[in-house]
Image (cartoon, rainbow, N blue to C red):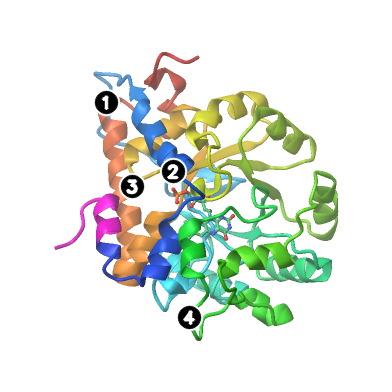
Amino acid sequence: MQPINLFEYEQLAKQHLSQMALDYYSSGAWDEITLRDNRAAFERIKLRPRMLVDVSDRNLTTSILGQPLELPLLIAPMAFQCLAHPDGEIATATAAASAGVGMILSTLATKTIEEVAAVRQNFPNALQWFQLYIHKDKSLTRALVERAYTAGYKALCLTVDAPVLGQRERDRRNEFSLPLGLHAANLATVSDLDIPHAPGESGLFTYFAQQLNPALTWKDLAWLQSICPLPLVIKGILRGDDAVRAVECGVKAIVVSNHGGRQLDGAIASLDALAEIVAAVDSRAEVLLDGGIRRGTDILKGLALGAKAVLIGRPILWGLAVAGIGGVSHILSLLEHELSLAMALSGCQTLQDIDPSLITPPQG
Ligand SMILES: Cc1cc2nc3c(=O)[nH]c(=O)nc-3n(C[C@H](O)[C@H](O)[C@H](O)COP(=O)(O)O)c2cc1C
């Protein structure tokens, strides 16, 4: 039986994943309060649909940093996608490109920067960004950035909410590590680095502690901008003052995100942080949102509160696990249909019609 929504994909995916992979994909940090609240925040918000609008013809297209998208959706950067399916990030990138949605490739991908970029040979307009984790070893970081630029990625997405890794206790219990034959492909190719096996600890937690730079500050953005002409996107902002700081540093887009509840447990739900950040940014950068988006109505709510587009995370992994590229494509088409239906039912012909007045209590 084919799943008909993203929740059914999640249930089905459990049958296709090892316990270690399922726990790594699904878990949040510590008590998973933020993980749950990301979903609950969408459920708290109620809509005020508009009636008697001609919605026979709906347009879901938009653009992000000047690049067109068929719908206001990007696939969030997620590490180790070959744990779900041997085609991993290539399947995700191909499904994204053929649906006209964006894809952000993780530094910790299990396919290389170049392999994923090659998907653009068949889809020259595909929106691909590279997500960066800044390592202590500056030359390694520089090599990753240069490879992303050379391979034609259109933006650098710097994740700032992970100076150290959040403690995901299921991963700790499982002593998470990659199975034989899987590697952090981009690190292996530049420096022979890999995720270690760490007794009593998640190998990824240990990797972050050993290799990533916890001393990163706003000043380092200038260094990044000096070595790479790509527009900079910052992922992991939850406060208006940080968003303003990012804009002042020349950042072109901000992803309001708590890393899917995987970093600081107890952090605000990303949807709850959105309005403050949209107001603080005041149209000086594009604002994106991720965390807990599972329905077309969730996308509608995010856009109504001022996001230009949203990122979707775990459901893509569920789609991959169930049916590889076909599963990811199906997830994307389910979201497209749900968003289109939600727009029709709330009186919106285009994404521009999705405004704060759709949310209760009336905003703006
Ligand atoms: C398995 C997994 C791996 C992730 N890896 C990364 C990563 O490498 N870089 C990053 O910036 N965010 C990473 N994230 C966070 C996602 O980009 C995104 O913020 C989050 O998953 C969105 O929430 P959602 O899964 O509820 O849609 C990861 C999330 C998951 C679930």
Residue 195 place in picture, x, y as percent: 61, 74
Separation of disc 2 and disc 4 at Cα?
Answer: 40 Å
Query: Is 294 in the magenta?
Result: no
Three-letter code, disc 4: Pro
Label 3 vs 1, first from the N-terminus? 1
Whether the residues at callouts 3 and 1 have beta carbons within 8 Å, the answer is: no
Q: Nearer the viewer, mark 2 or mark 4?
A: 4
Q: Which residues are magenta?
A: 1-11
Local secondary structure at mark 4: loop
Q: Of circles 4 and 3, which is in front?
A: 4
Camera-nearest label, 1 or 4:
4
Element assignment for label 2: loop
Earlier-in-chain disc, 1 versus 4: 1
Q: Which residue is mark 2?
A: 61
Q: Amino acid at mark 2?
A: Thr
| Residue name at image x 42 percent, y 69 percent | 20
| 4 drawn magenta | yes
